[in-house]
Amino acid sequence: MPAPTTLELLWGTPDRSRRGPKPSLTLERIVAEAIDLADAEGGLANLSMARLAERLGCAKMALYRYIPGKTELIALMLDTALGMPPENTTAPSDSDPEPWRTYLRPWTETFFTRAVAHPWGNEASTGVRPMGPNELAWLDSAVGVLDGTGLTAAECLDTVVLLLGHARGIAQQTATAGEDLEGGLARELGEVLSAQAQRFPHAAAAFAETMSGTAAETGRDNALVFGIDRILDGLAVLIETRRSRHERTQR
């Protein structure tokens, strides 16, 4: 019997009969252990079928009964690590005229949290590749909440790309700098800018204002949330433009 393809593994395969005793491993356990291994040891470079077999306490060849190789394994890891998107419970109302904004903000923040938890996901999600049910659920939920806004299908998809790109970029920086990204940047920049204030006056003044007592009361700038809100602000302008244009054509 031929080995299952990546798509078959992601989306389920017809029952494959196995002779002999009940297997001691499951595909779910293999993927879960692979995720733990990649999380603990710095990403996909240190992930191999041999190391995974050692972690599972089985022979390397035993893994190939379940999965053809590392490429297919990584596809399953990514979809499993993403999980399902937040549930969309928003609906248009007088108190919330922009339900798409109400949903897309936590949608992006949740994606960011999962990207930080599994930094190797950025590498795994590049290039042309098959997508699994969880990843497509993220896409579907975001595009779905934009239905009825007047945006074209391409614009809805581009919105998703913008939000995901922003979340992935900040997550990648966070993974490199550690949990306290802004604190680390503040320490690095503070000393340099104080000594080079005349050469870089605008950057020095902005940094000083950010670290002032007033800014400290409201917390440091949050690049993730700031970026999300600015993307959604721009989207709101486009949606309103389309709505106004539609109303004019109906008169």
Image (cartoon, helix red, strand yellow):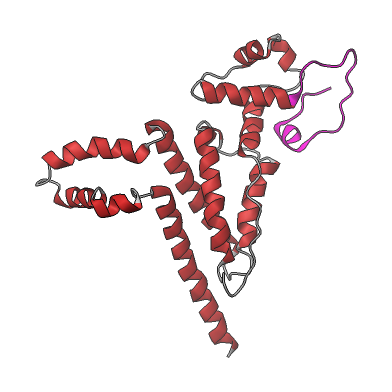
Check the image and report above or below for 163 versus 190. below
Q: Percent from the top left, x then y, of residue 206?
A: 22, 52
Q: Percent from the top left, x then y, of residue 55?
A: 63, 13
Residue 9 forms part of the magenta stretch = yes
Q: Give the main secondary structure of the magenta stretch.
A: loop
Q: Nearer the viewer, residue 180 or 193?
A: 180
Visible in this render: residue 233?
Answer: yes
Visible in this render: residue 70?
Answer: no
Residue 103 forms part of the magenta stretch = no
Q: Is residue 85 left or right of residue 106?
A: right
Q: Percent from the top left, x then y, of residue 185?
A: 29, 38
Check the image and report above or below for 85 versus 188. below
Image quarter hosting the N terminus: top right
Residue 249, located in which quarter of the rendered image? bottom right
Q: Is residue 181 left or right of residue 251?
A: left
Check the image and report above or below for 92 versus 157. below
- The stretch in magenta equals 1-27
Q: Nearer the viewer, residue 107 or 132?
A: 107
Residue at image point 52% right, 18% down: 46
Residue at image point 51% right, 80% down: 244
Total marks in image: 0
